[in-house]
Amino acid sequence: MTTSERGPNRIRIDQVRVGLYIKLDSWLGHPFLFSAFKVRNEEQIAALKSMGLTDIEYVPAKSDCPPGPPPADPSTKTIPPGAQESAALEALMHEKKARIEALNRERERVRAAERKYVKTANSVKNVMRLANNNPAQAAQLSGEVADEFAELFTTEQNPYIHLMGDNVADESAYFHSVNVTVLSLILARALGMSDRDTLREIAQGAVLHDVGKALVPGPILLKDEELSAPEMKLFQMHPAYGIKLMQAVPDLPKRVREIILFHHELCDGSGYPKGVQANSLDQAVRIVTIANAYDNLCNPRVLKRARTPSEALSHLFKNEAARYDKTALPAFIKSLGVYPPGTIVKLVSGRIGIVMTVDPADLLNPNLMIYDPEIPKDDAPSLHLKRDLDDRIERTLRPAALPEAVHDYLSPRKRICYFVDHAGAS
């Protein structure tokens, strides 16, 4: 077959070189994680030859070099694979099988985290339901939730941060309190806090921080547009309402009470309800304040104002740094990384993906779900940026900028919800 018969972008298999970007026909029938990729080494070329291919498609625009020269005699047959090529194929097939098994274990870990998230969110829902009529029981239940969180974070290893599915977030309207609790404890650990009692009180305060909303009229809480001045004034009373409810719980720790009352107070004195300067408050309060602010930027009451995770971090740092603890805010940004879970990214290779999991020890190399039309969406793996993809992030993208097919595949979350575990990525 001549080059013209193959098509302009199809070449003989013996023309493949390191640096060419190639496309294969089926994801299941080859040993590579992707059907389209840049050839990285001679072992991959050997495996391609061992597959019995005579020709292959390449993408000039994504290749680092042109194909190798064709043989002088177009009728020359491709050399059949030898033992070396067959061994390379077998090794890569074994590696792919092992990787898929590891990815399946990772997928199950995320599902386990989602189940735990739903259980925790339902407990928080019960806390809020009990707050008005039985604050003592609400406080007791919040303490039980806080115990579980403290156990999770009182370890030497920092937990991995997972993005939860949209279906999980939709199951509970109380994801915000769970998010704030998770984010507060991540920040507390980043600041070197490891005492179990301290972490427990931060967790309980974060779970209860919005308990006063039980006394705010429902139409105000559910309004999907900007509040009027009188409505906003009433809304901003929820910290004081929370303390009023918790007066019935005399043994509630002081730190928890302060988090409830002061979680909207800022270091420049512009917060509410009292307008105090937050630098004079317990550091735990300033921690929850940052976590609360970040989550409100990602998941605002008026969803059309939602920022992406990376935009939210950038906004806090560039526009509101004076409002927050000067040590805690940089630590918070560093702990979530440049690309927090939920961020849509474009890679140097041109691939597009969504950040699914962040390892605190390797923030620049998160796990991504990559758009690949050759792989069914439900089978799409979560891949480590460096180990699996050997790629780098070029820039972040807004969900609205994605082509429809990519948007539907990656399913950018309407609400960004986080949970943690210690298993991490395989």
Image (cartoon, grey):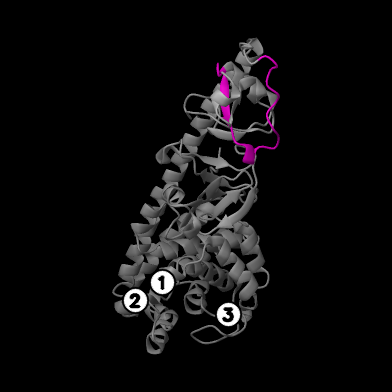
Whether residue 321 is situated above or below residue 72 in the rendered picture: below
From the image, tell me which residue sits under label 2: 223
Q: Which residue is found at the position 30% from the left and 78% from the top?
A: 219
Few, some or many residues within 10 Å of mark 2 (<14, 14–19, 20+): few
Helix, strand or loop for the magenta stretch, by majority: loop
Q: Give the CA distance from mark 3 to mark 2.
A: 25 Å
Few, some or many residues within 10 Å of mark 1 (<14, 14–19, 20+): some
From the image, tell me which residue sits under label 1: 301
* Relative to 47, 222 lies left or right: left
Q: Is residue 62 magenta?
A: yes
Q: Give the CA distance from mark 1 to mark 2.
A: 8 Å
Q: Which residues are magenta?
A: 51-73
Q: Which residue is found at the position 41% from the left and 72% from the top?
A: 302
Comes first in the chain, label 3 or label 2: 2
Residue 72 coordinates in the image, percent (x, y): 70, 16
Whether residue 168 is situated above or below residue 280 in the rendered picture: above
Residue 214 visible here: yes
Q: Give the CA distance from mark 3 to mark 1.
A: 20 Å
Residue 91 visible here: no
Whether residue 238 is situated above or below residue 395 in the rendered picture: below
Q: Secondary structure at mark 3?
A: loop
Q: Is residue 424 magenta?
A: no
Whether residue 179 is situated above or below residue 216 in the rendered picture: above
Q: Are marks 1 and 2 in contact (CB under 8 Å)?
A: yes
Comes first in the chain, label 1 or label 2: 2
From the image, tell me which residue sits under label 3: 266
Q: Secondary structure at mark 2?
A: loop
